Image (cartoon, helix red, strand yellow):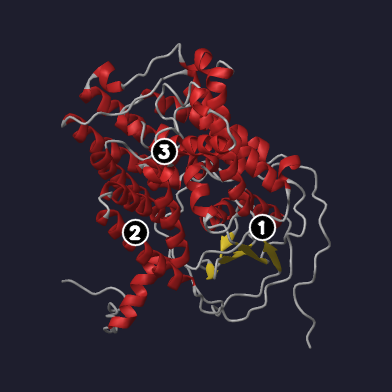
Amino acid sequence: MSFETSLEAALPPPDRVLDLRGETCPYPPVYTIEELSDMAVGEVLEVITDNPPSIHTIPWHAAKHGHALLAPPVKRGANFHLFLRVGAPPS
Amino acid sequence: MAQLVGAAPVVAPPRSFRERVADGYRRVCVDYWPYWAATLTAAFLNILLFAYAGSAWGVTTEFTRMGGHILQLFGVDVNQWAYFGPTGIGPNKGLPWDRTSGWLIFGMFGGALIGSLLSSSCQLRVPRQRRRLFFGFLGGVLGGFGARLAMGCNLGSFFSAIPQFSLHGWLFMLGLFAGTWLGVQIALHPWVMGTPERRVRRALPSTPARPSIQPYLGVLGIVGVVLLLVWFVQTGLERLGVVMLFGVAFGLVIERGRICFTNAFRELWITRQGHLARALALAMMLATIGFAVQIAAGAKPRFEYASLGALIGGVLFGVGIVLAGGCETGWMYRSVQGYVQLWMAGLGTLVGTVLLAYGWDHWGLYDLLVAPARPVSLLNEFGMAVALVLTLAGLGAWYLFATWWETRPAALPRSRPAPIRAPRTELREPAS
């Protein structure tokens, strides 16, 4: 999986930021879904994680719940920033 | 008449050598490898290691010995224990740095560290909830105990066992399915998961990322490995040096590919993602063929007791690795990146393996769970052709199962008591 290394990519400002640094599997995708479920459709959540496997599981889990990853994960040092847009739950 | 559809293909202008090198570095050393690339590389390395050393990739046997050494430092005569004495894996045979199995582990830590440094991924990661440290340790103990009860961890009893046609690998795999499911139920329980305090925080200041010195340290690490290899050859210990190189390669592969076997099983129960499971199934099919060729040419495969111990060990190991946050490969590569929780998992693994070694005779575990069974090799039961077909079919079935499972709808977030959230800080600064 490749990712951006700068934050200059044209991304919308997040409505919320979920800082999951220090958390390891299996919690990052679980916390992310909880947070997304608590937000309004169309809002943007920025997830910050330093757990390498999570950049693969978070977008997958979010997509299964109808949310969308807006851009490839952004890597800054050891941290990854993921931008997710809240979607309607799958019917 | 042929017609061009759409825009003409864009021909990229020739890039400079410098750009190409930078691009290649990024692809190999910064971007993560696809799971299949990493697992197939690991399987290929495993085939080569089996050809060179006569034994496949495994780590917990050596962890048990290391635990034995530590007890010896405290004056415990572990050679009196049945597990260390007659089974011949005792710590009386030299020290970890005198053994290939020791250098395989040192190499793995070194390779994972080099890979992490090259991608600037090292950072001290302290979990905000202290309970994570406790469960990391507890999971490590369960994992280490279960692994040795089953005669190996996710490497020795699974990744290297099934391709060597040992039935105990399949029992261990069954146990892993049950154990990781159980582990997920425990790990997502509010008492274990905890109140996610301080989860929502102000956005990080968007200062430009500073160039890191970590890649330079990574290059220094590579130089160190080469110097060590030269020293091994100079002193006539090239066998240790070569196995160390295998370890470094394995460490690089698990770090670059984020190979954590926990993920392959646990995610079936949470995100229903089967990517890593499928990659592992493919890799083990390759290893099966590679090992079969060598066995046909006279190599001796290792097979272990197809006992209740392998099944129960698999369950305990499955629970342990989910609680700890990583299996043997998962905690090894992330502990060098600075994961405090996984340091605890590593410490717990040592304790768990030694506990099992003690209980082997003192608690009658061997007589109860292992002795009634016998080592079963599919080769001896069915012959090479049938064993090969059975193993490949079993792995293929796992591949298809993971593919089908992925297509099922997501498990909805389970209902649990509403977390008591800390008041959120406003994200955006008032315009100033």
Q: Is residue B254 left or right of residue B80?
A: left
Which residue type carries mark 3?
Leu
Name the residue that disc number 1 marks. B126
Q: Nearer the viewer, residue A59 or B228?
A: B228
Name the residue that disc number 3 marks. B155
Q: Secondary structure at mark 3?
A: helix
Are the residues flagged by discs 2 and 3 from a single subunit?
Answer: yes
Quadrant location, the C terminus of chain B: bottom right
**Residue B125 percent across, percent down from the top left:** 63, 59
Q: CA–CA distance between discs 3 and 1?
A: 28 Å
Name the residue that disc number 2 marks. B228
Residue at point 43%, 65% (across, down): B31
Quadrant location, the N terminus of chain B: bottom left
Q: With respect to residue A9, does B90 lie above or below?
A: above
Output the chain of dot 3.
B
Q: Is residue A48 left or right of residue B155?
A: right
Which residue type carries mark 2?
Leu
